[in-house]
Every structure is written in structure tokens, then in C-alpha cells.
Image (cartoon, helix red, strand yellow):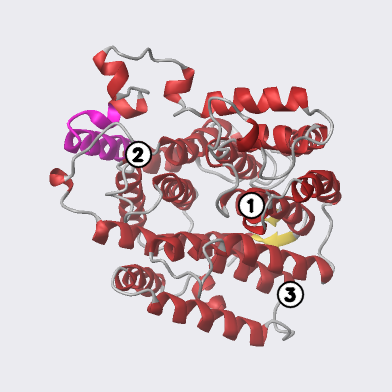
Amino acid sequence: MIKKIASGKNPNFWIFFHATLGIVSTLSPYALIAWFYFILFLSGVKLFSKKESFFIKISYLIFYLTSFEILARMSKTSPYIPYELGKYLMFILLITGIFAGYKKGKTGWFILILLIPGIVTGYLAGTPLKGFIFNVLGTLNIALAIIYFKDQVIQQKEFIAFLRLVIYPIISALAFSIIKTPKYEEIEYSLNASFATTGGFGSNQVATAFGTILFLLFLFIMFRWDFSQKRWMDIFLLLIFTFQGVLSFSRGGILGGLMGITVVLYLNRNISNQAGHNINQKKILIYLIPVILLLYGSFQLANRITNGMLLQRYSGETTGTLSGTREKNLNIITSNRSNIVLEDFKIFIEYPLWGVGVGQSSKHRNTTKGQLPHVEFSRLMSEHGLAGLISFLILSFILLKIYKRRYKVYMGNIMLALFLIAIFTTSHAATRTYISPILIGLSLLIVKPQIKENK
């Protein structure tokens, strides 16, 4: 079943199916629960058949089932589908794949080892199991994704299939959020994140997923890959994701998607002469200029609906800055994240070797005491000390390698953009969702170009 979904055959049926699944989930979570376990059971039965690569089958499950995390949280499926679905399932599947022999990413092992002291310190400090799952399991999954995905060779059609599997469940989440949204003109918009347009669920996580899909759909349009097999439908989905995403008033996820688009457009501007890339620049411009104008129009429409508040939100304004009672600064613009980062750095200076332990940083801060970390880099430093700093430097080293080889491997610019979005996501949503591990996994694959047969 999951292979049929990934294949790209009957795409409009699967778009309709997943949209319907999202709509039904607004009434009851049980349809989603049934579908999730139906796919898990069927895929589990066929997992050890020899008709297809074990790596591909495990990866199908990772990309498709973990992407239901957002919808599962929206529709409150816990405990049948756990709240931290992405973290649990990805951990189990990545471990399975690694034990099956897919383990080329040696740098991932170093990160795993470096995380151990902070885990032990957190355990001794009394961090509960929930605290470990929330704070460090996402980072563990990043390390495991590096081990499992790095330098695994796949075909271009398989890479595109992976992207489809990531997109479909978020279409369900999009449909859920649209149905749950009141009439747009009747919403009382403010300069804070909006729960009214995200199905009553965390706007940061929803916007992060929508921003990621915004980028992936843009790739389908730019490189003329088949998603819906109708270009107007791809563009329509792109605009709906943009519109609903910006109305969440959560900026990080959307900015991440736009950053990825900018990176790909900039680096692909002169790529026609690069080895392994066959891109017609004129045809790209014919598609891209209208799409970019429509994206701009989508934002302007959303801004008009909100009476200009959306633009003010993206400009970093708050009620206090507009009334003159507060001065706009970096902390205001970043919604208090910069203060958390500064206090995490102070904790690192005080506990430089092993840090204060997983889940303990919020207890050691002053002005931001009790506030959960939003920036993974500062969390690693405060809770893991020097080991956390080295872990992040390893990720930076991997990024540098991807940047250096971007013109030497097929789709190198796309891989660079995927990794950048993953790291950017950790700067505003830490590792709360499956997004960063899954994008890092995609970015480390080696994709073979699709060779067309001469007729």
C-alpha cells in the first residue's frame, strides 16, 4: 500500500484521500488511528520480502508515518498514536535500519557518544523520562539519521517518492486546520501566534510543517517533477499552504521554507553547465516568475484580511512596541528566544564540562526560568556542556561538506537547502518535531540522475 502511495500513480486520488482524512479527523481521531495502524501492519508484513530494497521500505515508513505526527497531535490521538509519535517511531525505525547494515555515517556515532554525559547528568539531577523524550530524543534521532542515511545511493524516482510521502500527511493537517478555522474575517487577530488558524494546536509546529511543505512543493514545480500531474494543482496547493501558514502568525517555519527556496534559486541560477544537472533556465523562469508573484499575492491577501497585522508581525512589532511602551529589540523580534539563548550561554560558562544535564537548563535560568528551550544550539551547550558544543560543531562540519560538494553531486543545491532548513528549524523550534531529523536524512542521500532512454 505505502509503495502505491509513493509511486505517484493516481496522485489526485491520494491528495483527495489525505484531505478527506484530515477533514474526518476534525470529527473523530479514530479514522486516523485506523489508517495509521493499517499501513504499519501491511508494511510490517512485507518488510522482509525481497521484492524491494530493505533500505527503501524502512525509509518509506520513516517518511510517511512520522509525518502524521502533526495531524495526530491536532486530533488528539494519544495514547493510541503517541504525542511524540515522530520521535518514538523514527528512533525505532532508524535503529532497525542501522542493525540491518545501513550505517555509513560515522560522524553520527560521535554525536551519540557526546550526548551520553548530559543524559547521565540529567538522570542524576532527577529529570523524568518525559523530560528526556522531549529534550534529547530529537537530537538522538538526528545522530541516528546521519548514521543511517548518509551516502546511501538511491534513484531520483525514489527521492521524489520520499518527498511525496512527506507531503501527503501534511495535506491532511492542512485540511484539518482549514476546517477548524472560523471565517477568516471574523477572527480577532493579534500580534501573537494564532491558534485559530492552526486547528487549535501549537502554531509554531504547524507553521514549521507547512513551511517545509511549501519548500518541497516548490521543488516539484521548479524541476517539473510530478506531484499531482497537474501543474495548476501543485501551484494551488503551494498557495494554500502559504496562505494558511502565514495566518498562523508563527514566522519561523514559513521563513525556513522561503529560505530554502531562496538558496535553491540563487545557487541554481548558473547551474546549466554543471556536471549532472540538466536544467533549462528559460523554462524555469516561465514557471517561477508567475509562482513567485502568486506567493507574494497570497501573502498580501492574508495581510489584508488581518488588517495589516500580518506584516507588522513579520516586522517584529508587538502591541507594546506599537503603543510605545516597549522598545523593539532582538529579544522582542525573536519572541524572547534571544534572552533564553543568553542565559543558556551563562549556564554553559558556569558548567562548561558536562552542562547541567538534559531537561535541567530551564531550572537554572533567572529571567527565563521555567521556559522551555527553543534553540537547540544553546540547549546543547547549557545541558551538555563542551560535548554539546562539539556536537553542534560536527553538524556545522557536515553542512560545510555538503556546501563544498554541492556542484559535484546531483541535486547538491537541494541537499544544501534541506540541511539549512533543518538547522534553521532547530533555531526556533529546537527538536520538538520530526522535521529536522527527516530533512537531514534526505540531505545526506546520494541521488542518481534519471536517465531518459533514447527512442
Label 1 to label 2, Cα distance in Å? 25 Å
Q: Residue at x 56, y 32 (%)?
A: 369
In this view, the mark in front (2 or 3): 2
Is 102 placed above or below 40 here? above
Viewer-nearest residue: 351 or 305: 351
Q: Is residue 27 left or right of residue 273?
A: left
Say which residue label 3 marks. 54
Q: Which residue is drawn at 28% across and 12% down?
A: 324
The residue under label 1 is which amino acid type? Gly
Is residue 326 found inside the magenta-colored segment of the image? Answer: no
- Image spot of residue 303 (x, y percent): 23, 33
- Image spot of residue 326 (x, y percent): 35, 14
Say which residue label 2 marks. 193
Say which residue label 1 marks. 131
In this view, the mark in front (3 or 1): 1
Q: In this view, does 207 lie to the left or right of 349?
A: left
